[in-house]
Structures are given as C-alpha cells and as structure tokens.
Amino acid sequence: MTFTIDPTEAAQSGRIRWTDSVDEAVAVLASDNDARPVGGGVWLALRRREGAPIGTLVPLDHLPGLTGVREEGDELVIGAASRLADLESDPLLRTHWPALADAVGAVGTARIRRLVTIGGNLAAADETHDPPVALAAAGAVMTVRTQDGTRKVPTTNRLAPGELIIDLRLPRSRALVGSAYEKFLVRGLWEYPCVHVAAVVELDSAGDLMRVDLAVGSVREAPYLVDLSDLTGHEPNRELIEVAAERSRQLTPRTDAKGSADYKQQMIAHFTRRALQSAISRARHIPARPGGTA
Amino acid sequence: MTTEIAPPAIQAQQLPSGIGTAVRRIDADEKLTGRAIYAADVRLPRMLYGAVLRSPHPHARIRSIDTARARRLPGVHAVITSADTARRKWGAFRPDLYPLAVDKVRYVGDEVAAVAATDLETARLAAALIDVDYEPLPPVLSLDEALADGAPLVHDDAPGNLAHEFGFDRGGTEEWFDRSDVIIEGTWETTRQWHAAIETIGCTAEWSHGRVTMWVNTQTPFLARQRYATALGEPLRNVRVIQTDVGGGFGGKSGDDNTSVICAILAKKTGRPVQLVNSREEEFLASRPRIPMRYRVKLGFTRDGRVTAKDIDVLADNGAYTGKAQAVLGAATVRHDVLFNYRAVRARSRLVYTNLVPTGAFRGFGNPSADWAVGQAWDLAAEKLGIDLPDLFLLNAVESGSISPHNHKVNSCELKQCIEKVTTAIGWREKRANRRPNRGLAMGCSVHVSGRRSFGDYDGSAAMVRVADDGRATVIIGEGEIGTGARTTLAQIAAAELGIPVEDVTVTRPDTDLTSHALGALASRVTYVAGNAVQRAAQAACQQLLEAAAKQTGVPASELWIADGHVHGHNPEGQQLRTPVGTIARAALYQPGGEPIVGLGSFDNPSEFPDEVRYGNESGAYNFVAEAAEVEVDPDTGAITVHEVAAVVDCGTVLNPPLAEGQVEGAIAQGLGMALTERFHWADGAPEDPTFSAYKIPTAGMMPKLHVQFADSYEPTGPFGAKGVGEIALDPIPAIISSAIADAVGVRVTELPITAEKIFWSLHPATTQGNAAHPRSDKEDPS
Amino acid sequence: MPDLVRFTLNDESTEVHVDDPTATLLDVLRHKLALTGTKAGCEIGYCGSCTVIVDGRAVPACLQMVGLLTGSNVRTIEGLSSPEGLDPVQNAFAECAGFQCGFCTPGHVMALRALLDQEPDPTEEQLDATVDGNYCRCTGYAKIADSARRAAELERITRRRRLEKQEENA
C-alpha cells in the first residue's frame, strides 16, 4: 500500500545539532532558518506539546564560558546558559542584585529551575516570566552574538532569528543602590504571577532619589518600564511612592483565573509600593520589614 | 457472664490485635517501587493508542465530518464517528449521552470522533486532522440562561431544560416558621470543582470471541460494566471489566463519561487492543466535576436557640448530560437534615441542563454544597441569637436514636463529642478571648452515610475468604482499592477474624468475571458494607478451619481457637496443640471427600431504598464530623491564609489510624481547594486554559496546621464497630473558611470560590472599579 | 533516520533510537523503555509526578528533551530499590502512610532521594520545600511531610550503618 502524504500532515520532528564552540553554534544558527538555541528546553518542550514545529535545536550549556556569574570591571556578568537553580543561590548575584536573585528564585518550582537557563527564560519573551522584569528594572544589557559579530542591547529588546544570547550584564552594585522584586501569588501557592513588579533606586548622599526604575510584568509582551524620571531629585517619601503607585495603576493587565484587570491594577499599585519601599530600604541599608507598608 | 452492653471505650479495648493499629499497607511495595499498574501502564501486544476529537462549540449542529485526512496519516488504524457506534443513549439515571455525538454537540469537550494509531502522538495528530463542519447554535451557559423563557433547549425532550425535579414539605414548615423568633435567610452558590486526581481517566480494551475485556481505573467496576454494555449495545455478558490500580477517584472515576466506551469501540473496529487515556486538558474539559448549586436557605430558631424549620430551594447545574447529578442533588437536599433536630423541612430542588461540561459525583456527594449554604446560615444564626456557635450546635445536635424528617435512623452518634473535642482542639475559647486583628475563627458540622441505597434496592457486598494449604488467606471481593487503603483494612478484618497475620492475607482486584457483584468505592461504603461482608466470610472460613481441626485432633471445635496463624487448644491428654492453619487446610483437602476452606460472607446495608421524594433511611450507619478553622486576611490584598484546621470525626472504630487520618487530611485539603484555589477563567462556555497552570489544587506549602482526632465511638452494625470516613471531612470546610473570613474582616462571601479579589473589593468599596473596563487584547499597547 | 541517544539509565549504559530527539524523556521511558513507574500527570511540568533524577538533580521528565541527555546519568523509580530491599525514602513512605493512591508517589520519592543525595542532613525547610513542588490530591500532604522527615532519619541511619560496615571490613 502506498500513502500520499501531504507534508503538512506529517508529524513535525525536531533535530538536535551539537556544536563544540559558540562560533560553530552561531554558524549553525546562521545556516539553518529553522535552527534555534536551546538551554533547558522547557519552553520549547511546552510549545512542542502544543504542536508547534521545533526545527533544529542547538544546545548551549556544554559550551565553555556560557555558564556562571563573574565580575568583569564594573559589571556583573551572568552566563546565558546558567541554570536558574544555580543563580538563585549565587552569592555574587544575591549581593549585587537581590531583586534578580529573588526573581530567578520565583520561577515555577525548584524542579523547573533546575532545567531553565536564564538566557532561555529571557529569549522566550514570555510576559509572565519573572527574571525579565527584574532585568528590565536593573537596566541589564545582553551580549548578543551573530555571525556578523557581537553587540550589546537592552534585555527588553527582542531577539532576531539567528541571534544568540551569550551573557547578561548588570552594573556592579554601589552604595545607596537598592533593588526589590515583588511577585503576588494571589492563591497562596506557586503559579504564574497575578502581578509582578521590580524596582531599582539609587539615592544621593542627601538621601534623595538619583535614579528610580520600575518594571511591571504581565501587562504586555515585554516588561513595561514605568516612566518615573520626574521623581528624581526628590526625597523618596510616602507621597512620592504614591505617585509611582498611581502611575503604575494606569497599566492595563489582563483578566484571567488570577484576577480581573481591575483588581490587578490595584495590586500593581500595591506591589509597586512594596517594591519601592523595599528597594529604598535596601539602598539605605535598612532591612525591609517583611510585608510592611509605609 | 454479664449481659450489660459495654460502653464504647470498653468495647474498643476488646478489639482483636491488628484492629485499630497502624498496619502497613499491603500494597506498599508495588506502589513505592513504580510497579503498580495504573490505567496508562497496561501494555498488551499489538496495542494501539486512542485519541478523541472534541467539540470546540458549546452547542452546534454537526453538518458533516470528513475523516479522510486523518485516515491517510501513516500509523492510523481507525477513525470512528457516531456512525460506528450503536447510537444508543446511556447514563446512570437519565440516559441522554451518546458514545460519540449524534447530529449535535452540547458542550465544549463533547466527543465527536476518535482515532486509534500506533502511538499517542500520531493518534492526537490524526484527531486534529478530522474536519468537522459545525453550525453553531445559541447555547445556554448559565442557570439563568437555561431557565429563561424561550431559552434554547439542550435536549429536545427536556422542556424548560429541566432534567429532574422534586420537592417535599415534612412536618409543617410554615407553622414552625410562624412559631420562630429568629429567621435567617440567604442564597449561596457553589461552582464546578474538578476531582483532579493526578491520574486521569483511562481504559485499555481488547475484544476476543465477541467479548470485550476492559482494564479501567474505575471506582465501580460492576456499575460501570452495566453502563458500558448499554452504551456499546452489547448484552451484559459480553463485557468484562477489570480494575487497574486507581490513581485517585474522589467520585470522578465512577463511570459516567465516554472515555472507556470509545476505547472499546476503537478496539472493536481495529481488532487490536487499544488504550485511551485522557490528557489533563481532556480531564478538565470532559470529566464530571462537582455540580454548581444555587442554594437558597431559610432557617427558623426560637429565641433560646432551638432550630425549628428549614426551607430550601436548590438549582443545580447538570451540564449537558446527566450522570449521577440527580442523585447528588438528592443528597444535597436531604442529607444535612440528619445533623440537627429540625422539626420541619421543606425543599424544592431542580436539576437544570446547560451547555457546559456535565457534572456528577465528587467526594461529599452534594453535602459540601448544602453545607456551604446551610453551614453559613447557622453561623449567621449564632451571631443573631447571640449564642456562641459551638453552644448552638450542641443545643441542636442529634444523638443516637434520632430519626430525621426523612426517616434517617441514627444508630451510633458522637456528634456532641466531636463538637466538644474540636472546640478544645482549635483552642476556641482561648482564641475568642484573645482576638487578633484580621484573624477569624469558625466551626461547622456535617453528617455522611456509610453506603447509600441508590442504584436499586441493594447496597450490599459479598466476599469469599479462602484459606490455602500454604496458610495464606485470599479475600476474593469485587470492591477494590482507589487509594484509600481499603484492601489493607479488608485484609485487617479478615486477619483479625481468622487469627492470622495481616501479611498472610491477599485481597484480589475486582474482575467482573471472577468476583461477586459489588457496588464499589462510593458513598463511603467500603469499610462498612464490604468490611461486614469480609468479616462474615472470614468467620465462616474460621469456623470451617476449626471444624476441620476438630475432626483432625478429636478436640471439640468450641475448645479450639486460632491465633498467630496456628490452631491452638489442648488435646484430651492436656498437651498443648499448636498446628499451622495451612496444615489444617491441607489435611482437610487431602482425604477422601476432602474440601477446601472457603468461607462465604454477605452483607446488605440495613437501609431503605428512598422513594422518589427521597423519603427513606438511606444508610445503616451515619458518620459525623465537627471542624473548625482559623484564618487570616491581608486587608491590603484580600489574600487569605488558613493557619489551622481542626477536625474530629465520628467514624466508629478507627480500624487503621494513619489511613483514617489520611482520609481526613486529604479531605480537608480538597475542601480548602474548593474554598480558595480551584477555579478557571471561563470564555465562551469553557475554561480558557484547562490545565494545572490555571486550575490550582492545594500544594504542601499552603496547608495549615492540622489537628485530626477521632471520637470515641462504636457502631454496633459495623465491622468491629467501624463506619465510613472517606468523604465527610471535606463537607463543612468551604463554609467554615467563609465564616472565619467573615469573623476576621466582616466580609461574607456567598459565591464560591472565595477569592482575594472578592474580599478586596468588599474591604475597599471606595476604590474605583472599572478603570480597566476594556481588558486589552493580547497585542494591544497598554499606553 | 532515527537518532541514537546514549546515556546512563539506572546505572546501566543505555542506547535509545528515537525518531525525534526533542521527544520527552517521559515519553521515551514509558513507551520505548517500558519503565512505567514514572507517571504522566499533566505533561507541562506542574504536578511533579514524572520527577526523575538527571545528573543528581530532580527534574520533570515531561519537560526534559531526551536528545539533550547525551552523556547524562538518569535515575528513575525503577532504579531505586534493590534486591536487598527498599530505599530509605521508600521505607519512610511505607512507615508513615505517606501515600494513598500512590500515583504521585514515585515523583515525591525521587525528589526526596535527590535532596538526600545532595544534602544528607537536610533542614526541615529543605524537606518542606522539596515536598511543596509536587502535587498530591489524596493525602493533604501531612503524611508526606512526615515521610520526608522520616526519610532523612532513615538516611542518616543507613549511612551510619554503611560506614560501620566499611570500618568493620577495613
């Protein structure tokens, strides 16, 4: 018996292409339109189950130099193929960027964090993911490789096909810088966030705000950076935090099982307050009261 | 000899060894090593895998189905539609479900076509390649839509979309309300809750010589067999059902859905074994979740706190097809009335078709919906009467000898003991004396059956106990194990009666060809009903052993006894006899006219088959619970933390404490899920994301501190004094959590689930709602 | 052409021919290798019933692409007990009635096994955090938490005995 198979009816079968170096991996990505890098493969495994074609996967985490956290000059450098489980307890990351360490530790369960890489988590460009929100508030950049070379772009940029994230770079922490990540689990158990917010502040020697960055997740594809630049130069007091909360409350989240859009707006404002208070406290080297309010 | 009836405490002390102790489960090794065979673990030579194509519409006419593309896919062996079925409607009480949709689909998830292929991925891919031309019809997606004048009909033979209705007025309700000083009224609603057993529903089927064997993870092999035969258009004798290991039941695997039926049809069509197992998404779309009910309740009390009358009006969302929903509605209407000394009760109950996923049996069987409403009404009553809730309960609680308005005859009853003990366990008085901000406390009670006469005038069980010449006993019974440890407790009962170690007892799996008829694991019945049957069978086997030993030794049977697997006694010379039971069994066999040791035992629940208006003593024994909880609310977010839950259960003698505790602890977790976490966001008649991502069952991290105790109790009709324990601890939990939240922050939630959001809006009424009146579409810019 | 994936499975070197190396380890274990002790509960990484140990770490087999396992060391529930008896973690679940239907149990057992391999003397917080990820619909978790604590005790006892035996032999 012969079968006439319509190619669209054949099961999409994926391939794995092992390489020995970043150069070779980049070359494969450039030569094969269906090729993409893979870290833990979690996000791709989920898409595969939904029936999405997978194409050629180029594994990364065995390649030298793509894992671990290191200091390089004024920067903290995180290898893109580092697993979240390793990052959440990394002493360098926890010291310099507690908000990012918290966001990394907030992803799914420990089981999943053992598979997921930070580069993969970011490259998935999924609005519900935790680390991209903290990275956005921190002003992190990513080193991106193509066959044409290397460039550094903000982590909020979308990747083009063939691009490979090599590492993520954040400034090393300085005195008077504080960061915080708040994820609201509305049902009291682990899931994607009801709302999630990251805040980064820097104070001057007088205690006034030099810098304030606030990123909100799950309101659009990329983390949304709330413009608070007009608040710099002022004392970070309750009124100022209210201005920030009111501004973040204007975002339009989506109604789902975790809450209505209306409720989420109120919660974005609430957790904006908490994240800012916590970041300000950390900048002042005062431990934040857990769950405390101004 | 004294003829006095010993009080429970004394009787409990007389329990034989192995009863009331933490006996290790007899199935521990296979379940801990991964060797237990669940539905999806069955592997047969040449086995194919099935997949089902389901309706994406809540209500539509099927214009045509084109299976050509699916058939062409390599690896596909069969594609079936209703044309390949007997086109016969089936259902436990009201046959209205076809194995595959005929002409119309009635909910998102309705089975339309199915595929068998060499592997699961191919089967699922092929199912997606079936082209169905639908003509969408206007659906009814809520109770109100279904009951509206001129509403579209879900089934043409159900005018007004009513699947079932009944009512009664017992004891002169109006007169009692007239004589009441305090009236409490309110309406409470529940929502669909899924069993979410970690193992989904599944079947493997194989035909041979015109008979089909179905390996199914069903709770009720014999009842399921009957329905499958109807659905397949086969005589009963052509269907054999064998129970696999069951990865959690909770009512969800009691054979009201189409998965096994479709599996058998695919196996017939292909002439090969076929395995069909629900994906998690299918389990959410097309299993039989808990019935949402809108429950209006009116209670009357005298000034001093005596309850007078209760009036209820219940609307239940049947979904698109009727499984056990009408029986569940019956329980939701009458069961609670066993609990308190109501003088009069009146009810009107209606089961309503909608174009939503069909509903059915779920642990508690209607009780949690009744308790959600009536339990909160009692909490309001205590407040209005100015009587502390435990005192109000104690004032009205039933006792042994009580008879409900529906003729439920209460045998053993330690409800008052449960209330008193739970008051202490939660620290009620201390917590009341030292109130803390945003913390609240509440209590609730419930009653459940130990078996229920509902599938005809039989709620019995029969067992054989065989003692072989190796000294081991085999309990042959059709009841089975769904995770509760039932096989272990049945083994304990047999071992205790026989005087052999429990490790020497095997309990068979249900197989409709081999074991006697059994109703299965439902209505908290196995310990009580099957336990009695096993006890009687073991007694008969024991008697046979003793008589055989008497013949063999010359010592009268009345002077012999069995302990530690040996027959003991003294011969006429006064010498001690100690012979292994296996030796006795072998000697009984190997002699002219030899016979095996096989005891037969049978027990029918001493209950009445309730009439069409639910009058009748539905069970021979009733179990009781009192529970209490302390919660805390975060006023900024509305988020709820449950700190402590205490439960005291009257289930008669506790045969195996860790197993009984496990039933209570698991039931509390499911009750907390029903109350707080388990929900979907719905769109167009279906859950938007039918996975564990949206539907959250409780995890270890959210569990409160638990205080689980048992009342000192003894049920005279139970095996060693035992009653059922499987369901009851779930029933009052949602109402207790709601009342505790009301106690904490003054917000009374009337619709399940309780969400942080509902509490938040009640606490912040001035906060503007409606800012995001136009929820963005996925790609819309938020600015 | 099928891909060949080589890895160590329950201490034996294993070669699997797969048509699609992006297939999940769960699928390959259950359908190619007839190791059905690893359970499919949700297939999206939520329930934990498919937890296996890969290179010493407990991960969900439903999200682990088999082709990425080349050279890895994989342990499943089938590799845990030996002819001498059950693993201390398994014994703990039996002693504490830490399972009911048993379907989620292999996942819980493997997660705790991985923890004890890494942390022979874990804190209560580590034990609770390990249990928290895995769903169970039967037990309400109280007896799983008891089992986890007991598993840590039995692990300490087992290790001490092993050490004593080694010293005796030496």
Image (spheres, helix red, strand yellow):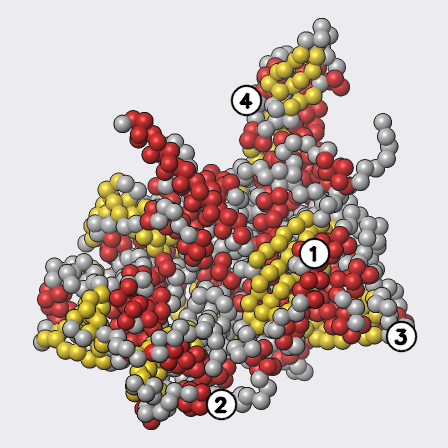
C-alpha separation, residue under disc 3 versus residue under disc 4: 71 Å
Looking at the image, which is closer to me, B170 or B20? B20
Which residue in the rendered view is the most extreme toward the top?
Answer: B573
Q: Which mark is residue B424?
A: 1
Marks 3 and 2, how far apart at CA: 48 Å
What amino acid does circle 2 point to? Asn
Q: From the top left corner, tell me how far across and down residue A239 is, in percent.
A: 44, 90
Q: Percent position (x, y) of residue A88?
A: 32, 64
Q: Quadrant of residue B255?
A: bottom right
Amino acid on which disc 1 is placed: Thr
The residue to which callout 2 is attached is B771
* Most foreground residue, B9 or B649: B9
Residue plotted at (55% across, 50% down) = B218
Q: Residues within 10 Å of mark 2 (few under 14, many from 20)?
A: some
| Label 2 and label 4 in one chain | yes
The disc labelled 3 sits on which kind of residue?
A: Asp
Residue sitting at 28 percent across and 57 percent down? C65
Q: Earlier in the sequence, mark 4 or mark 1?
A: 1
Residues at marks 4 and 1, CA–CA distance in whole angstroms: 50 Å
Sequence-first tag of 3 and 4: 3
Which residue lies under the disc numbered 4?
B470
